């Protein structure tokens, strides 16, 4: 390459192209390194062994993943699969850049303003927090967004070629049908995308309307239509992988996809349809609030304003280069995806990548329209070019600041939950000779399957046999199947088994199922003897002693009631001056203990985020809730050494602080003209039976959640009986899980969470209260609340009083 070519490459007009290199750089800097729990481990495994993933099968990601795993000559297999997502995210941003550049190139304004607007759009999309999260770990949703971006780009290029042809571009005319390459490439990708995920189909109405609007004659242009159909079928040919591979042995996945019934069942994801269209017309206002809340996490208000400006710019009619067809394409694709996705209840944040991408693309178009407006309004002068450059540079600061803000908190570089769990299974059971069964949910079973199929490691059956709890079997049913043959362990707390009369003992990172009356003390616990009332503390394990402020610290305590008790007891743990007075929620209440049996349970506690560095002695007392007497055992459990802070957040202004991970920043309730802001105490909201109360909660993420939490919004009476208890959802009506494969909520993020509470038509008149809180989705354990000092003060927050009138 000559010196002149190198200089041209780094010229001012080309530096926006070079700036695009930032995107793969910050993706690689934050890329997950190892196994990610759940589906990402399954995709990695399925691609490696050329299996078949859960419905809809993911044929495209399987083959593409195998390509990445084979051709990338370095890095662990999971890292190579994560790299595929980073490549898809980068490609999406490049398609956005190309689409905006194409629009800008149809104007007579000189570059580099168009490339700067295109760079703004690409960086805005790539640095949006939800998009970034999915570009750094193996998942299909980022690739779904890439298909959308590629299709939009190709159709935009086709629009530009059509516009040039109408303007009488002689060079285009000499080439003949200049639109065919873009249109035919689109047809191929449209078919190929369907083999990846059915979600790509929901943009088809917008695509079809755009094509017919732009060239109505295509409806009887059978040659072009035939070519498009042929190329679409060529893309769909990837589906042949299923019937070819499925009957082969061994195969990970269904073996009957060489039959029409088996094929249809998987590719149409029939078992997942229960998640679709869960909300009716009356809920659309609340769902719009949900989308607005999620959109604000992705983009700043100026960016959203630019997107609206982009819609206005495209709606202008300007001779043969009218951009209105693009309005049909972009807004139509947005609406088609939005209306479907926002009314589902499963992983909506991931499904919304497409609509978010289109908003970012429109923001880039809006910036270009803004530049064009200024260029026509500002008098031509020597400083005009500099003024425009400075203005565009100011807008470019937006996505760059977004990169700086998201980089430290979005990173999965140190995320290792999958590898930690696999190591825990081997470390805990190796050499014990228990011949135990370890029952696992999907999230924990997938990294174990990967370890067996890819790394060739599997626990010795003489120690433990991992088993998957499939949807057609319950944990309780499997306990009855396996417990007679030896020890049974769970990877998580399962309340249904406790309700059936079994005991779940905390054992290391697991729970062991034991029969009632077991009086043995697990050997990993430190034996002690401290008596308070009817209870004796007989053992403990404080496994983590070096911590940071904000950590969730594991603690296991073992108790015995030698003669049994009719009273309710709970432990009270002191960390320095902080008091963790536990509730009975999700613990086996003491009146159910059998005389002499040892009960082993977890009493984990969360440290305040502003806890000063130092050494804090940990001690435990017992409290009799029935008599309100605290027995001062003052039993020392060791010291916690606090150094550093996990997340620098402020909690003083919150209404409630749940487990130092989720804060209730605000709450309102509305009925008609009445509006109450929590806490409204006795300034009651008055309703009648059958009325509707709209409750809106404002959440703030304080730390990366360690589990998927469910919100509860209950209407209770003075005796704490719940008269409305069906408003239990993953936050935002299922749209925003706190943790799904990875921590989805990040420190500092705020969410608006609306609910519609229907007052029962037969509810008796009287005084009621609205309570809210969170619990772990699988275990049902409520998250404790903390006061300003960090002490536990309960596990629910009362918004205020509600009076049901009999009038």
Image (cartoon, rainbow, N blue to C red):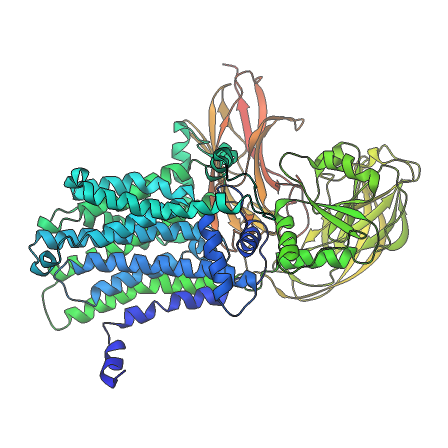
- Residue 622, image quadrant: top right
Of the pair 13 and 634, the residue shown nearer to us: 13
The residue at the far top in this view is 807
The answer to whether residue 215 is seen in the rendering is yes
Locate residue 6, reporting x and y percent: 27, 81
Locate residue 438, reporting x and y percent: 74, 47
Say whether residue 352 is left or right of residue 727.
left
Of the pair 62 and 90, the residue shown nearer to us: 62
Q: Is residue 553 above or below residue 407?
A: above
Locate residue 297, reporting x and y percent: 42, 51
Say whether residue 128 is left or right of residue 510.
left
Say whether residue 349 is left or right of residue 232.
right
Locate residue 303, reporting x and y percent: 32, 54
Q: Is residue 67 above or below residue 236?
A: below
* Residue at (53% x, 61% y) in the render: 412
Instruction: Please identify the quadrant where the N terminus is shown.
Output: bottom left
The answer to whether residue 127 is seen in the rendering is no
């Amino acid at each position: 390459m000559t010196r002149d070519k190198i200089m041209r490459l780094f010229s001012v007009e080309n530096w926006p192209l070079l700036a695009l290199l930032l995107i793969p750089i910050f993706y690689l800097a934050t890329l997950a390194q190892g196994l990610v729990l759940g589906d990402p481990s399954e995709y990695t495994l399925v691609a490696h062994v050329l299996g078949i993933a859960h419905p809809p099968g993911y044929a495209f990601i399987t083959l593409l993943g195998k390509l990445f795993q084979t051709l990338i000559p370095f890095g662990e297999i999971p890292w190579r699969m994560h790299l595929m997502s980073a490549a898809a995210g980068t490609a999406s941003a490049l398609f956005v850049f190309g689409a905006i550049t194409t629009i800008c190139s149809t104007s007579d304004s000189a570059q580099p303003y168009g490339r700067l607007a295109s760079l703004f759009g690409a960086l805005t999309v790539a640095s949006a927090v939800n998009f970034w999260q999915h570009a750094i770990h193996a998942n299909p949703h980022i690739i779904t967004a890439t298909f959308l971006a590629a299709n939009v780009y190709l159709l935009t290029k086709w629009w530009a070629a059509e516009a040039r042809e109408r303007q009488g571009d002689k060079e285009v005319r000499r080439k003949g049908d200049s639109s065919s390459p873009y249109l035919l490439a689109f047809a191929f990708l449209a078919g190929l995308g369907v083999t990846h995920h059915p979600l790509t189909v929901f943009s088809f109405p917008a695509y079809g309307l755009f094509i017919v609007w732009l060239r109505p004659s295509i409806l009887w242009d059978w040659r072009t239509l035939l070519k498009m159909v042929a190329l679409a079928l060529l893309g769909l040919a990837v589906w042949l992988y299923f019937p070819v591979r499925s009957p082969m042995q061994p195969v990970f996945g269904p073996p009957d996809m060489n039959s029409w019934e088996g094929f249809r069942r998987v590719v149409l994801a029939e078992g997942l349809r229960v998640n679709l269209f869960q909300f009716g017309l009356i809920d659309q206002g609340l769902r719009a609030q949900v989308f607005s809340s999620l959109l604000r996490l992705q983009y700043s208000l100026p960016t959203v304003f630019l997107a609206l400006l982009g819609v206005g710019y495209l709606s202008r009619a300007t001779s043969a280069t009218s951009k209105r067809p693009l309005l049909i394409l972009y807004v139509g694709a947005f609406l088609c995806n939005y209306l479907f996705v926002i009314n589902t209840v499963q992983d909506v944040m991931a499904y919304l990548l497409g609509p978010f991408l289109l908003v970012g693309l429109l923001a880039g178009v809006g910036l270009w329209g803004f530049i064009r407006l200024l260029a026509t309004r500002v008098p031509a002068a020597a400083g005009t070019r500099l003024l425009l450059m400075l203005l565009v540079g100011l807008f470019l600061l937006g996505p760059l600041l977004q990169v700086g803000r998201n980089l430290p908190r979005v990173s999965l570089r140190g995320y290792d939950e999958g590898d930690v769990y696999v190591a825990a299974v081997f470390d805990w059971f190796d050499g014990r000779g228990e011949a135990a069964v370890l029952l696992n949910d999907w999230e924990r079973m997938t990294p174990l399957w990967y370890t067996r199929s890819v790394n060739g490691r599997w626990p010795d059956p003489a120690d433990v046999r991992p088993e998957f709890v499939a949807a057609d079997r319950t944990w309780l049913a499997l306990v009855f199947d396996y417990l007679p043959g030896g020890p049974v362990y769970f990877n998580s707390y399962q309340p249904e088994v406790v309700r059936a009369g079994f005991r779940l003992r905390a054992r290391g990172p697991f729970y062991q199922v034991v029969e009632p009356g077991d009086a043995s003390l697990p050997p990993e616990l430190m034996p002690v003897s401290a008596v308070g009332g009817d209870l004796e503390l007989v053992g403990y394990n404080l496994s983590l002693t070096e911590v940071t402020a904000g950590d969730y610290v594991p603690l296991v305590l073992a108790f015995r009631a030698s003669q049994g008790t009719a009273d309710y007891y709970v432990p009270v743990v002191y960390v320095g001056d902080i008091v963790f007075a536990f509730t009975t929620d999700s613990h086996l209440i003491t009146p159910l203990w059998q005389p002499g049996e040892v009960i082993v349970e977890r009493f984990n506690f969360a440290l305040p985020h502003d806890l000063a560095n130092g050494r804090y002695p940990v001690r435990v007392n017992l409290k009799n809730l029935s008599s309100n007497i605290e027995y001062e055992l003052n039993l020392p459990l060791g010291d916690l050494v606090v150094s550093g802070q996990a997340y620098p957040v402020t909690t003083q202004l919150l209404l409630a602080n749940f487990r130092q991970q989720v804060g209730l920043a605000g709450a309102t309730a509305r009925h008609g003209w009445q509006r109450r802001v929590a806490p409204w105490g006795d300034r009651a909201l008055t309703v009648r039976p059958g009325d509707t109360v709209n409750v809106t909660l404002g959440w703030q993420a304080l730390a990366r959640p360690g589990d998927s939490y469910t919100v509860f919004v209950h209407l209770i009476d003075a005796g704490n009986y719940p008269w409305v208890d069906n408003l239990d959802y993953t936050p935002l009506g299922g749209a925003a899980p706190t943790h799904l494969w990875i921590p989805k909520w990040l420190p500092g993020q705020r969410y608006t969470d609306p609910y519609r509470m229907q007052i029962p038509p037969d509810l008796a008149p009287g005084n009621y209260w609205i309570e809210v809180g969170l619990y772990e989705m699988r275990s049902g354990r409520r998250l404790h609340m903390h006061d300003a000092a960090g002490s536990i003060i309960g596990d629910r927050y009362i918004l205020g009083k509600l009076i049901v009138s009999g009038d």
